[in-house]
Amino acid sequence: MRRKLLVGNWKMNKNRSEALDFIQHFLNHNKIQQPGDLEVFIAPAYPLLESTYRATEHTALEVAAQDVSAHESGAYTGEVSADMLYSIGVKTVIIGHSERRRHFGERGPTLTQKIQRALRARMEVIYCVGEDAEARRKRRQFEAIEGQLDVLDDLDADDMGCISIAYEPVWAIGSGQSATPIQAQAMHRYIRDSITDRFSAELASFTSILYGGSLTPENATEIFAQPDVDGGLVGKAALNADRFIGLIKALSS
Ligand code: PGA
């Protein structure tokens, strides 16, 4: 069976004391019996990764990075390598978030390089895809996603086994308007079929596909109930520990 994942992406929010307060509150209040196939992550900003990793060690909460350099090491001022992340215990990284694509111009070749750097460092990758409002309006959403999935063509089956996909329609991120369960399911099915075509039905059936975009404890249950939705990538609702626990509850039920 494929794993279920819930990933809280803090983006550029929370300083050190706010991050540690969240973790303390979360650990004190999360009484959910987490099923064995469910993994829960938070993804803080780089400077907080090590302290959050230490604060969550030996708990059911894991830590992921929001990004990684496309380069291995050397003269790349401001960059953080996959090896650096792995060396402090961070073994999962989000790559290709739409905010990285939009604000920092990240596209196919860079994203392929980032994925490969992360995999070579033995990290797992959550690769994000999502169409913008215009593509959806023109009914070209599947085409848009297919193009973003092309980066997977440079990977072999072993690599693909270390990748989860997050479907995050750009128009749903931070807008308060999530995709409907039907829209989410249709795209998740499409993505799974595309992985079947590129690799195999077996690999596709093991790949976790997460939904992201204005997920809340209120709308998550119905979205998570869709057969091809294996969890969520959450921004705003992951900034509050009680709301985040509400999402774990929705995914556990
Ligand atoms: P949101 O963000 O939950 O605030 O819409 C999701 C994301 O960007 O991953």
Image (cartoon, helix red, strand yellow):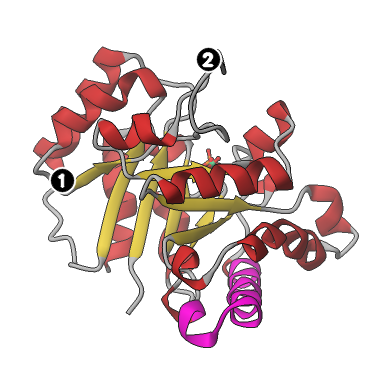
Image spot of residue 190 (x, y percent): 66, 75
Image spot of residue 42 (x, y percent): 33, 39
Q: Earlier in the sequence, mark 1 or mark 2?
A: 1
- Binning the other alpha carbons within 10 Å of mark 1 as few (below 14), some (14 to 19) or many (20 upward) gives some
At x 86% / y 50%, what residue is drawn? 134
Q: Which quadrant of the rendered structure holds the N terminus? A: bottom left
In the rendered structure, the answer to whether residue 141 lies left or right of residue 130 reads: right
| Cβ at disc 2 under 8 Å from ligand 1 | no
Residue 198 in which image quadrant: bottom right
Q: Which residue is mark 2?
A: 78
Mark number for residue 156? none
Give 117 or 62, whichever is nearer the viewer: 117
Q: Amino acid at mark 2?
A: Gly
At x 77% / y 67%, what residue is drawn? 142
Classify 210 as above or below 125: below
Highlighted magenta segment, given as a residue range:
182-204
Residue farthest front in this picture? 74
